[in-house]
């Protein structure tokens, strides 16, 4: 994961909640003139047209006028992430529609997708929020159960990995490494909603900031594949990985999961693939990127499948396209494994540039309509 990578799924909040509904160019039913906040991002500024707004639907109309790729976040005062839009290129625009309750938030722009960002305060005063289809409550309940199941099933796999690491059994640890990450990768937006856990367990070496301690899966990945040995320090890091993921498992049940955060989370999983897995940057040493790739797609597909009954009623053409694009990407991934029931994928360093381009095109073809799913379920 990149150091700046954070979630679109809202962390639990007693005082306030803000639910994001993201679409690349979609206009929402809330996009009246007085409900739009224009966000102008540059390399050294983050200007917002509104500092205070009443609760209800609101649209952020984002324009990047800087020279760097940027991100825009809505944050709680304690820096938990409410919603965000990544990879906003220079000269491009994005829209994020949200339903906000009373409270105080910050809008942050992160030029270069680094650091804490340039921030503006947004105060939300009292008002009303929209009702939702009861079918969506069922989808949320089912997804919450799925997220918890993935966390519960991850811990034994991580323990098997850590046991091999601590025994100094490099071969066994290598074999257990990728499977231990599948549940995390499937539900990454939920996992990342807690902010402090993701940097501890899934940070890549290339994304370390000055003075930041490196812990987690990728430290052990480097030890196993690059160093070919396990040190005493690595064994301590292995124990810490279990501790941190145990904490994650306990906290999954407290995540504030909503229909729109599920939809946005599905889109973010595809962004994860596009910015890390397709490029080969996620698993720099092990080259097990396709395992993560498949898990991200499975997680996105699960969220979509649960939301599909409502999305199909509201936008049948969208669900038809999403069904086609998910099937196409699944079929393409199957080319890289002999057994469609296993996660024994080809090492990604054996996948050539032309094939990586094909995978990238398939991801982009799915990500574009997937970005409209949140708007479809919010109608």
Image (tube, rainbow, N blue to C red):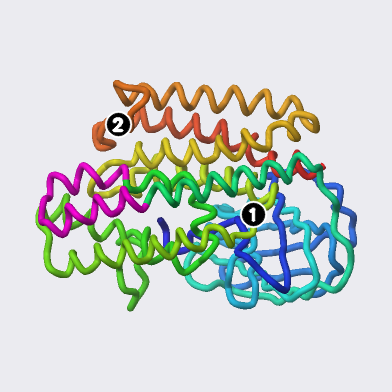
Q: Is residue 25 above or below residue 104?
A: above
Numbered mark located on residue 345 in the image:
2
Q: Is residue 161 magenta?
A: yes
Q: Measured from the top left, where is residue 4 in percent x and y?
A: 47, 63
As drawn, is 232 to the left or to the right of 63? left
Left or right: 352 as drawn, with respect to 275: left
- Distance from disc 1 to disc 2, alpha carbons, whole Å, reads 31 Å
Above or below, 144 relative to 7: above
Q: Nearer the viewer, residue 377 or 109?
A: 377
Q: Is residue 148 magenta?
A: no
State the residue position of label 1: 257
Q: Position of residue 12 (x, y in %)?
A: 63, 65
Q: Which residue is depicted at the point 55% across and 28% down?
A: 326
* Residue 54: percent from left, percent from top: 87, 69
Give the side of residue 347 with respect to residue 42, left or right: left
Question: In the visual, does 152 lie left or right of 213?
Answer: right
Quadrant of the drawing holding the C terminus: top right
User: Which segment is the magenta one?
Assistant: 155-179
Q: Name the front one of labels 1 and 2.
A: 1
What residue is rendered at 75% in x and 26% in y? 316
């Amino acid at each position: 994961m990149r150091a700046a990578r954070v979630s679109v799924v809202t962390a639990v909040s007693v005082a306030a909640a803000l639910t994001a509904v993201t679409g690349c160019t979609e206009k929402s039913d809330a996009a009246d003139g007085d409900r739009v906040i224009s966000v102008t991002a540059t390399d050294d500024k983050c200007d917002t047209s509104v500092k205070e707004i009443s609760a209800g639907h609101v649209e952020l109309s984002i324009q990047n006028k800087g020279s760097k790729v940027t991100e825009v976040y809505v944050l709680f005062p304690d820096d938990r992430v409410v919603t965000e839009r990544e990879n906003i290129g220079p000269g491009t625009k994005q829209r994020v529609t949200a339903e906000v309750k009373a409270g105080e938030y910050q809008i942050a722009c992160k030029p270069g997708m680094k650091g804490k960002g340039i921030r503006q305060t947004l105060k939300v005063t009292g008002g009303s929020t929209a009702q939702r289809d009861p079918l969506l409550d069922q989808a949320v309940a089912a997804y919450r159960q799925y997220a918890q199941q993935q966390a519960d099933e991850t811990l034994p796999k991580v323990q098997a990995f850590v046991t091999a690491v601590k025994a100094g059994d490099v071969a066994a640890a290598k074999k257990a490494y990728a499977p231990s990450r599948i549940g995390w990768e499937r539900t990454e937006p939920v996992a990342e909603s807690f902010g402090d856990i993701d940097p501890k367990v899934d940070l890549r070496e290339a994304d370390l900031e000055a003075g930041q301690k490196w812990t987690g899966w990728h430290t052990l990945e480097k030890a196993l594949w690059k160093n070919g040995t396990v040190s005493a320090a690595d064994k301590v890091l292995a124990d810490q990985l279990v501790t941190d993921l145990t904490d994650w498992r306990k906290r999954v049940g407290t995540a504030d999961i909503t229909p729109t955060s599920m939809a946005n989370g599905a889109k973010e999983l595809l962004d994860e693939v596009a910015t890390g897995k397709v490029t080969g940057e996620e698993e720099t040493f092990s080259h097990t990127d396709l395992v993560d790739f498949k898990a991200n797609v499975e997680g996105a597909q699960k969220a979509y499948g649960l939301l599909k009954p409502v999305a199909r009623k509201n936008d049948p053409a969208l669900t038809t396209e999403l069904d086609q694009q998910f099937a196409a990407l699944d079929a393409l991934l199957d080319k890289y494994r002999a057994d469609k029931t296993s996660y024994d994928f080809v090492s990604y360093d054996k996948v050539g540039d032309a094939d990586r381009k094909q995978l990238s095109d398939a991801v982009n073809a799915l990500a574009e309509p997937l970005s409209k799913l949140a708007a479809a379920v919010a109608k």
